[in-house]
Image: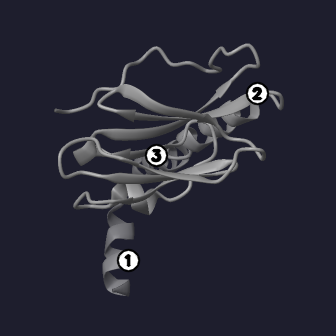
Amino acid sequence: MIDKLKYHLRNMKPLDVVIIVILLLGSFIPHVVYGIQLSQVDEDAQIIATVKISGEEVYRVELSEDTPHEEFTLEPAEGQYNIIEVDGTRIRNKEDNSPDQLGVRRGWISKPGETAVVLPHQLIIEIHAESPDGEEIHQEDSDIIIPM
């Protein structure tokens, strides 16, 4: 193992090291951008969770300390179900019958910009911030494309 490492280090050019360092630093850019967006959310902003099936909003709730615990079942199509749980400042896809269980494994979400997706059921749970007058903060102009 050490011999292989020495072999590769001997064959590296100085520009290879520069490229590796630039790519390593560049990999942290999404985390920095996300942190900046979260810091720009006002304290008086409302955190809103929306549940969409096939791009159509079916449920909307403000996530706050006063939000009561709630659990409900959605049936996107024949033979499909999703159990959604809201608990104060967070929401999750508690249970579903999709094959990969990615939405369930995502767990609780509570911060603006976070999403939980169940592609086989075309279900998306999104968190976003709204100003007190109801306008979405950091609204993106892009549309979500849902495969059919």
Q: From the viewer's perspective, is 124 left or right of 112?
A: left
Q: Nearer the viewer, residue 9 or 125?
A: 125
Q: Residue at x 50, y 37 (%)?
A: 126
Circle 2 residues within 10 Å: few <14, some 14–19, many ≥20? some
* Rendered residue at 48%/47% (across/down): 18
The residue sitting at 39% across, 68% down in the picture is 9
Badge count? 3
Q: Nearer the viewer, residue 75 or 143?
A: 75
| Quadrant, the N terminus | bottom left
Name the residue that disc number 2 marks: 45
Earlier-in-chain disc, 1 versus 2:
1
Q: Which residue is mark 3?
A: 23
Question: How far across and down, in percent of the image, does residue 116 sit?
Answer: 44, 47
Up the image or down, 114 lies above or below 94; here it is above
Gap between marks 1 and 3 measured at Cα: 22 Å
Q: Secondary structure at mark 3?
A: helix
Q: Amino acid at mark 3?
A: Leu
- Provide the residue designation for mark 1: 6
**Residue under the point 23% across and 47% down:** 120
Is disc 1 in contact with disc 3, using a CB cutoff of under 8 Å?
no
